[in-house]
Amino acid sequence: MSQIDEIEISFTGSGRRPRSEVLAAGGGNSCETVRSLPPRGLLNSCPAGVASCPASSCPFRSPRSPRLTLRESVLLLGPRPTTDGMEFSELIRTGRAQAKLLRGPEAPPLRGTLCVTGHHLLLSPGPQATSDLWLLLLRRVDSIEKRVSGDSGTITLRCKDLRVLQLDIEGVEATLDIARSIEALSSLESVITSFPFFYRPKGLRLGDAWHFHPPERYYKRVARETNAWRLSEVNGDFSLCPSYPRAVIVPRAVDDDALARCARFRQGGRFPVLSYHHAPSGTVLLRSSQPLTGPQKRRCAEDEELLRAVLAGARPGARGFVLDTRSAQAAKQARVTGGGTEAKAAYPGWKRLHWPLERGWPLQESFMCLVEACGDLEQSMDRWLSQLEACHWLAHVKEALSTACLAAQGVGREGACVLVHGAEGTDSTLLVTSLAQLILDPSSQTIAGFQELVEREWIQAGHPFQLHCAHSAFSHARPKHEAPTFLLFLDCVWQLGRQFPLSLEFGEGLLLALFEHAYASPFGTFLCSSEKERCLCEVRTRTHSLWSGLNQPKEQRKLRNPLYVPNPLAIWPSVELQTLRLWQGLFLRWIRPPEPSEVAWEKVWQIVTDKKTEGCEPTVSASEPQL
């Protein structure tokens, strides 16, 4: 390149004057240092002593606002927050270098100037090139490998969306410096310095779409069907349960004082709350964490009263099932450390069932093993299939779908109330309740309904995305908190869509988008691990919602299933292993070119989409086949 290309990324902080990140790329004698700072409002003094707290709307000024624990301070603000802010330029050792980018077997290589900014890796092909500027959000990098040979070097980036990228860079020192810069910038722990706080796309306004799926909206739907439940704001300051939202739906017969005592009897304060009301049967699906019975077999009269009120508010003669996602042995061992299960004598009308689901490290190990197997397609088919089976990923899919079907059967066919919990109630519990709703509830099978389901049953319900999605399948470090529970949910939804291709309004594209954004995103929807943390970071006022981006008309056309026919019936999947399939669109999409049959299907898909755009409905059968 003979001239300097200037790339400017505008930032807006705290509603004040926009700030800019300017990068000089290309030839020339100098390159301006790239700096990215947090919004200024995040750096003012705080009465609680948190250096990076927004003083203008500090949550500690109100007695109904949350307190920040030491763990939350480290997680949200970084290990050493400073009043001077984060100078990203200190982590960028080399601003630019000449490089060649290899993106996979089908994509042509790109040559140009490689630039590192506070949040992105950019490759500028130059003014004479026909290709556009290439961008990679640095938070998408899961692991980095570097090697040097002669006067050049190679950096291999393994991304959280399972892509593998290779950069051939001129100069050994430039290679090592860029590798160190990427390692440092991609592993920053602070939430408020992440890219969503600076992302300002055209056509979107801050605050849009955050109001789409509040708990009040779902409560209004429940209130139209029954008057046995009420919306409680007992957790308004998050002091009762830090992982619950401010408002929860509880039995009308139980007051807030009783709820407070129930919270002290459940791990993490996660007392039983409504997850789904099944109008045809008048019964409900609930979720919670384990009771803290301990070795002394403690009891809580208010907790017992709450579950009695659940049955009393359902249809006459209704019974209840407690679906524990741990084995009976694991639940028994939990009593030693203060946990436990609901005693049969203390909860008349409720029967306990154990249906163990893997979580945590075994699930992450299975995911890593599967990705490793999918990346090795050179071996024989028999050996590859054997390696695939040894990963046990499809076995986890089978168990998750089986447990969800059991919960859905209890509510939809048996006319029973079902309470789902494991230990903490933030992983396998949410997996089961969300899948059961997708099976039973036709509204959850629409695009808007599925977004509401993810928002209500995963994001607002306290799934720890910040911890579980910190790394994907390529990280060299042994995972501490990582677990692909949300990915397992998306895989199960994909299996449902494959078995019932007419019943889901959305296609694979929405599931892939959710997978990518859960691990790294310019939007703030999946930031943090609870509503309390999002409140402390002011995520809803300082970042854009993913739903505002996905609900743009252009994006909706890509995500919509053109074969969708509304189905008022429940969709009961087959859960036998021989009916489950590897999700090739996710696990193999960067590795192999599409099969001819897939190309043909994409052409049919486009024809059907065009017909719908022109106002002509394609002819499809109204009955939904089960494949």
Image (tube, rainbow, N blue to C red):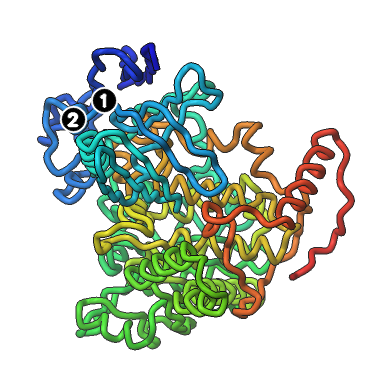
Percent position of residue 589, x then y: 56, 54
Residue drawn at x 45%, y 59% is 486
**In what element is the residue under mark 1?**
loop
Residue occupied by mark 1: 36
Question: Looking at the figure, which quarter contains the N terminus?
Answer: top left
Rendering coords of residue 40 (x, y %): 23, 21
Q: Nearer the viewer, residue 451 or 182?
A: 182
In the image: residue 596, left or right of residue 266: right
Q: Is residue 11 visible?
A: yes
198, above or below 530, in the image: above
Q: Is residue 394 left or right of residue 51?
A: right
Q: Secondary structure at mark 2?
A: loop
* Percent x, y of residue 404: 55, 71
Which residue is at a point 72% across and 63% down the rendered structure image?
Answer: 500
Q: Quadrant of residue 339?
A: bottom left
Q: Can you say whether 32 is above or below 244 in the image?
A: above
Asked if residue 53 lies left or right of residue 162, the reply is left
Give the camera-side residue of 317 and 211: 211
Q: Amino acid at mark 2?
A: Met
Q: Are marks 1 and 2 in contact (CB under 8 Å)?
A: yes
The first of marks 1 and 2 along the sequence is: 1
**Amino acid tagged 1:** Ser
Give the residue at mark 2: 86
Please state if 159 lies on the left or on the right of 37 as rendered.
Answer: right
